[in-house]
Image: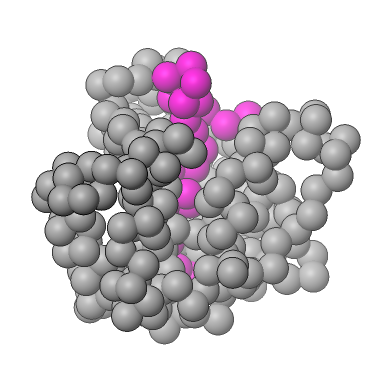
Amino acid sequence: MSRLPIVDERSKPLPTVEALERLWSEIRSRPLWANGRFFLYLRLRSRMRLKMLRPDDLVSIVPEGKVNDCSACTEICCIGHEQTVSLRFRDIATLMDIGRVDLITKKKPVFSDALLAEKPALARTVASDAWSRFPVLTQNAFGACRALSEEGKCTLYPYWPTSCARFPYALDVEAHEITYSQRCRSFWIRSDAEPKVTAMKLAAVAAYNERIKDLVLLAYAPRQLEDLGLTRYLVA
């Protein structure tokens, strides 16, 4: 089985995604602390990092030319509660636009203290504001993502979530490093892989920055998000 996507070259209109991007452009057009919002800015900054990351800020410790080979994979990375896919506002907007909101759920798996102690990256995810507030992709009784086809292919591509787009590349924010997930055991070391490697690095940074954007938008534009129909999917 493979998680290789089902490719649909037809372009779909994404009006909610476009409206969300316009809203973000409006928010970022002036300093977050300006226009009487200084105390809102201080409260938000006390809870989270507000500085967007740039690829140049990071060091890649991924071996040169290392890229995933989904066609050779015997373990689908989209199966298992630990692989639950968290959604960002952009992901929710995309699923709304392509008519797949049936894949959005507020119900999340519960992990044992022992597992969280064993897996610090998972523990950080579960402890985050994003995990507590935002929905995830639904899984079936076997823990498989419901976006998978019977053949094990992704039915959302090219409209899959940001965290799926960057996998198996990951970000260690504290160390300022881009890493390669140990969960991916099917890969190539290729001399011609640089374009894909670059795209995966950019996707890893984008996935992190989307979390910052979401929490800023929640703080500064809750009414506009509600008008777009995005907040209905958040955990109260």
Residue drawn 70% across the image and 62% down it: 108
Against 15, is 124 above or below? above
Q: Does 197 sit left or right of 66 as displayed? A: left
Against 73, is 170 above or below? above
In this view of the protein, which residue sits in the foreground, 66 or 159?
159
- Position in image of residue 231 (x %, y %): 45, 72
Judged from this view, the residue extending furthest toward the left is 29
- Position in image of residue 89 (x %, y %): 40, 62
In this view of the protein, which residue sits in the foreground, 181 or 224?
224
Q: Does 21 sit left or right of 214 as displayed? A: left
Against 95, is 64 above or below? above
Residue drawn 32% across the image and 78% down it: 228
- Which quarter of the image is occupied by the N terminus? bottom right
* Residue 198 among magenta residues: no
- Position in image of residue 64 (x %, y %): 39, 17
* Residue 168 among magenta residues: yes
Residue 62 visible to an observer of this rendering: no
Q: Does 21 sit left or right of 215 as displayed? A: left
In this view of the protein, which residue sits in the foreground, 177 or 181?
177
Q: Which residues are magenta?
A: 155-182
Against 167, is 182 above or below? above
- The colour mode here is one colour
Residue drawn 47% across the image and 49% down it: 163
Residue 34 visible to an observer of this rendering: yes
Query: Within the image, what quadrant is residue 122 found in?
Result: top right
Residue drawn 33% across the image and 44% down it: 39
- Which quarter of the image is occupied by the C terminus? bottom right
Tell how many labels: 0
Query: Within the image, what quadrant is residue 196 found in?
Result: top left
- Position in image of residue 22 (x %, y %): 17, 64
In this view of the protein, which residue sits in the foreground, 38 or 118?
38
